[in-house]
Image (cartoon, rainbow, N blue to C red):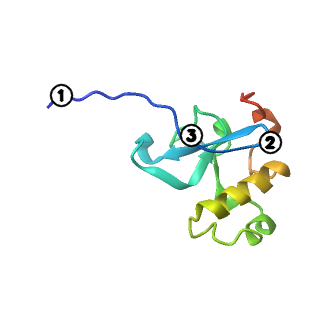
Amino acid sequence: MPFRQVEVPPEVFLEHAGVTVYRTYRNDDIDEPRTFLFGLSPEVSDDSPTGDHGHFDVRELPAEILARHPGVNEGEDVAIRGAIREAIDNNAIPYVDVSDYRQGAGP
């Protein structure tokens, strides 16, 4: 049976302080959202290197942030959102300068 691939934008996971955080997807398949991997640009892809398009793993945020948001390692969205918000506020996303992504000003 024929099929067609259609490009769709990634889900916005959260918006905070002028920064938009997007979900990433296993093999870029919209039906397989990643739990821990996110990007700060809608161009982020599952195979983006860490830092490229703001690609990051929430489990790699600084330990002091993760300690204040129990539930991150269990994949709880509320905890993950809280940790990412704090990381944005403190420019603490590994390999990424958050200010490059404020108000959609990605590289």
Q: Is 101 above or below relative to 25? A: above
Depth check, front residue: 17 or 60: 17
Query: Residue 99, percent across and down?
Result: 82, 37
Query: Residue 95, percent across and down?
Result: 74, 47
Q: Amino acid at mark 1?
A: Pro
Q: Residues within 10 Å of mark 2 (few under 14, many from 20)?
A: few
Q: Amino acid at mark 2?
A: Ala
Q: Amino acid at mark 3?
A: Ser
Earlier along the polypeptide chain: callout 3 or callout 1?
1
Name the disc covering residue 17, or none: 2
Q: Residue at x 69, y 60 (%)?
A: 60
The image quarter containing residue 96 is: top right
Q: Which residue is mark 1?
A: 2
Q: CB under 8 Å between callouts 3 and 2?
A: no
Question: Gap in Å between the C-alphas at discs 3 and 2?
Answer: 24 Å
Question: Gap in Å between the C-alphas at discs 3 and 1?
Answer: 29 Å
Q: Residue at x 37, y 27 (%)?
A: 6
Q: Residue at x 78, y 34 (%)?
A: 102
Earlier along the polypeptide chain: callout 1 or callout 2?
1
Q: Nearer the viewer, mark 3 or mark 1?
A: 1
Q: Which residue is mark 3?
A: 48
Query: Residue 19, percent across and down?
Result: 74, 39
